[in-house]
Image (tube, grey):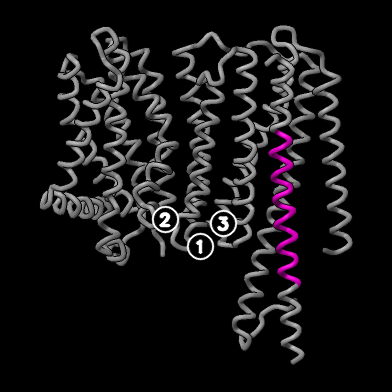
Amino acid sequence: MDNLSYLFAAYTIVWAVIFGYMFFIHQKHRRLEREIDLLKEDMHQRQTD
Amino acid sequence: MKELFTRIFAIFWKDILSELRTKEIATSVLVFALLVVVIFNFAFEAGADTTGLVAPGILWVAFTFAGVLGLNHTFASEKENSCLEGLMLCPVERHVIYWGKLVGSFTFMLVVEAIITPIFLALFNLPIFMPRLALIIVLTTLGFASVGTLFSALAANTKARDIMLPILFLPIVVPIIIAAVEATGLVMDDKSWGEMSTWLQVLIAFDVIFLVASAFVFEFVVEE
Amino acid sequence: MSEKNAVQANILLGLGLALMIAALYLVFIYVPTEESMGDVQRIFYFHVAMAWVAFLAFFVVFVCSILYLWKRVIKWDIIARSSAELGIVFTTLVLITGPIWAKAVWGAWWTWDARLTATLVLWLTYVAYLLVRSYATEEFRGARFAAVLGIVGFIDVPIVFLAVNLWRTQHPTRLVFEGGLTSPMLLTLLVSVAAFTFLYILLVIQSISLRNMETVVRQLKDAQANPGKEQLWTI
């Protein structure tokens, strides 16, 4: 591997990991939001009963 | 002040008595340390020319692993027999328990090291009487005990106690392991005090800092 | 999320993105190629920037651990935990980019050089910080133990660096990065540090808000399971 390939590899890994982490956070965020909405709805349902 | 020492001694004496009665931990740790020395000797194929290079490392690996075993025991029996709750009920400040346990682990490790070191030196054909080595061992063991007692109490309250202690403990004591190995190497090569002094300073600094820090933080580990 | 919060979040995001683009420009276009090592030396800027940010993250862990043990308010533990996770992510990246750079320049992945070795010990310390939470018997205990580790671990950091550096001066290798920083290099480095600090702040905020959402979920589920229980808060 020549010099530039190493440079490319290093930066690619950095960005892959950071984006991976951000993606993971995003997914978790959406899942939790959905869960909160469901639970709230359920709660309101029972309060109106 | 005198009361403080009496209390610390009481905790220490309790541990000594229970250990003297069973002798289980002392003998097994001793044998283990010896085994480590022997096995690592084969691992590094210490011929006459390379002995000086590997000897310090082997000694301190043996002491480190044996130390972990001994430290595990410091709070393991307390936890098992619910003695820890008993200790906590005593109207003493938490850090007194720390000091008492510290003296116990420190003494225990020192005894093991005092027995293993002459054997080790003989096996490696090194002079038996080395007061500077004794100083290094005392300082390093104090460092081990200071942090180790804290983490032993912590690990005793976790699910995988035996593996948790080394995972927590070893990264923290890396500096004094480095210092101990380097200083031991210098002593075995019969170098002057001056060269050793930087490493001794590292050891002393570590001991002071972590004795204070561990004593201070100990109460947060054992509070319930 | 309220309107104001959304606007603030977007501003932060925009600033962060702008900083990162500026850093990238400086690293790849502005700064001249280093003579002895060639282009691969450009790894240095992000490598060092991430190391500094990791250190900052662990400092935050230290402060929040003290605050948690002192005040016993859960938010400090949440911040500490999120910061530690990010610190480990960045430290891991430092430990990956370092060897890539070393391999390119000296032909060896790992040379036990002082800084990388100390970084490795740092990594092990904070991985232990996260492990202690999983191995604790209850969550609040895990938080307490982790806080203890956050304090002791950080106190250890300067001693580790000191010892490892001394060790390396005793046994020097020929593989050392010498050379000072010219001012374009310094500028590039500073902007990179700023960019990554921003990234860290953004991610830590996200992570904290996730933890808070988890708490809300737990409270809601708890309310669901015990319908008669008095609600102490309104949604």
In the displayed orientation, state which residue is furthest to the left: B21
Q: Chain of mark 3?
A: C
Secondary structure beneath dot 2 equals helix
Task: Say whether residue C114 is left or right of residue B219.
Answer: right
CA gap, disc 2 and disc 1: 12 Å
Give the labeled residue for mark 3.
C68
Secondary structure beneath dot 3 equals helix
Residues A40 and B17: in front is A40
Residue at the image point whose x is 56% and y is 25% from the top? C116
Instruction: Report crowding for label 1: few under 14, some 14 to 19, many 20 or more residues within 10 A (C-alpha).
Output: few
Amino acid tagged 1? Phe
Give the labeled residue for mark 1.
C140
User: Which quadrant would residue B194 be assigned to in this image?
Assistant: top left
Residue A31, how many percent across, how many down?
A: 72, 62
Principal SS element in the magenta part? helix
Residue bounds of the magenta highlight: A14-37
* Label at residue B221: 2
Q: Nearer the viewer, mark 2 or mark 1?
A: 1
Q: Chain of mark 1?
A: C
Q: Chain of mark 2?
A: B
Amino acid tagged 3? Tyr
Residues B108 and C93: in front is C93
